[in-house]
Amino acid sequence: MNNEQPIIVGLDIGTTKIAVIAGRKNEFGKLEILGFGRANSNGVKHGQVLNIDETIKAIKAALDDCLASNPDLKIRDVYVGVAGHHIKSLQTRGDIVRQNTENEITQKEIDQLVEDQYKTYIPAGDQIIDVIAQEFTVDNFQNIPNPIGYGGVKVGANFHIITGDKNAIKNINRSVMKAGLITKDLVLQPLASSSAVMCQEDLESGVAIVDIGGGTTDLAVFYEGILKHTAVIPFAGENITNDIKTGLGVLRTQAEAMKVQFGSALANEAKANAYITIPGLRGMPAKEISVKNLANIVQARMSEILDFVTYHLKQVGLDNKALNGGVVLTGGGSQLRHLIQLTEYVTGLPARIGFPNEHLAAGHIEELAKPTYSTCIGLILKGYDDYEHNRKQFEKDYRKVEVPDGLKRTEEEVVLVDEEGEVSREKLESRKGLQNFWSKFKDGIIELFKEEEDKHL
């Protein structure tokens, strides 16, 4: 373990779940997960904190769970993801005339150029969350990715500025603070997800990262190595669940379970003669639900979300074949069956699922490499980006904090007998101690077809 590196913690405050992940880079530059906790989220709608008390409770529950996974951890500063339909972005241009033209351009001058953009006029009630340089110019030379070391009189850049509602941001910061944590920085969720599932080749070839969460679908578009566009679409997995609940007349918990187990984003792929039987409430007759009807509801809402994605791509002129990397789907909602095919059909671009294992060290439990945790792992990577560029002060934790057994994938030898009766020994991966680790979540899961009224109704 490289104890010289700081331990960085990502806090993903989502509509359906709150996740806390602590990580540290090893000597190979890969992320080792030292702690992992999650809790059901209450008080957050469409990515915005509405009920602060409920959010504080959920953050504390996720934090306690993370500390239970590794008692050696000490968590105080966290990188927090921000989303919600109050998020907006704008493009600006900034230039400075250099004081000392005899020397090469330094990082200090670039930092000053970025700092000046925080004075950009934005509507009252909003505040700037992030300023991202796109491409630089030095005198008459354009499209310079990094001008440090160049010589010239004038240096400038195009900037992508992300803004959000002051009250919405205040609610996030208040929730984090009252949970006993300090917000190290707020990071736009699509940018965090992008850093977790994207490599340098994706950045250069052009790619649209679509993070389908519980309350929002986050979009980040990269082209020729530059962030071209960001957007937060206020429709996601929760909307699909609500559509199923309303359209099929079932309980919310049943709708969620049907979506996960039987849902398909393509109605043509669903079996016409397959049915799901749901027990009736309080002695009423059982319901037969067509898998085809379920798929029709899921497809209608997913198509609407992807239409928004196509609209945003048209806004920046990248809706044709310009994005060679295509669409990368991530987030919990990306695990819907046949979503890749629907995405390719609606957008006309190739699509794939983005997993955050690109930057993870080997040997972790499979749970951590799920698209659900892309944002949280991306937040840690954003923290390391700040650390490596000396943007913020970090306390280095020199204590020996190891990856706990509960988060390690272990090997177990099993004996297999084939059809011909031959005995062979094989190593199979199993999750040592994971049963206890996840038991507290399983206790809270409501049975799929229990015969009582939904508390939310």
Image (cartoon, rainbow, N blue to C red):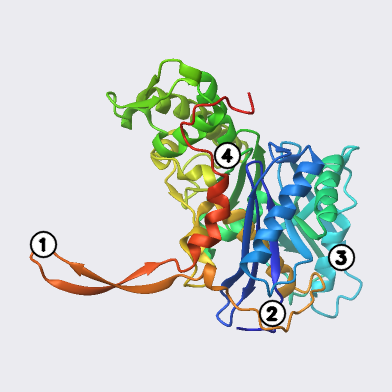
Whether label 3 touches label 1, CB < 8 Å: no
CA gap between label 3 and label 1 equals: 71 Å
Q: Is residue 307 above or below residue 388?
A: above
CA gap between label 1 and label 2 equals: 51 Å
Q: What residue type is labelled 3?
A: Gln
Q: Which of marks 2 and 3 is nearer the N terminus?
A: 2
Whether label 4 touches label 2, CB < 8 Å: no
Q: In this view, does 89 lie above or below 95?
A: above
Disc marking residue 112: 3
Kindly identify which residue carries mark 4.
313
Question: Which quarter of the figure is the N terminus placed in?
Answer: bottom right
Kindly identify which residue carries mark 2.
5
Nearest the viewer among 78 and 268 is 78
Disc marking residue 419: 1
Instruction: Bin the neighbour count of mark 4 within 10 Å (Cα to Cα): few under 14, some 14-19, many 20 and up.
Output: many
Q: What element carries label 3?
A: helix
Whether label 1 touches label 2, CB < 8 Å: no
Residue 22 placed where, x, y %?
66, 67
Q: In the drawing, does residue 361 fall left or right of residue 214? A: left
Q: Earlier in the sequence, mark 1 or mark 2?
A: 2
Q: Earlier in the sequence, mark 1 or mark 4?
A: 4
Can residue 133 be seen from the camera position used here? yes
Please name the residue shown 92% across and 72% down the image.
99
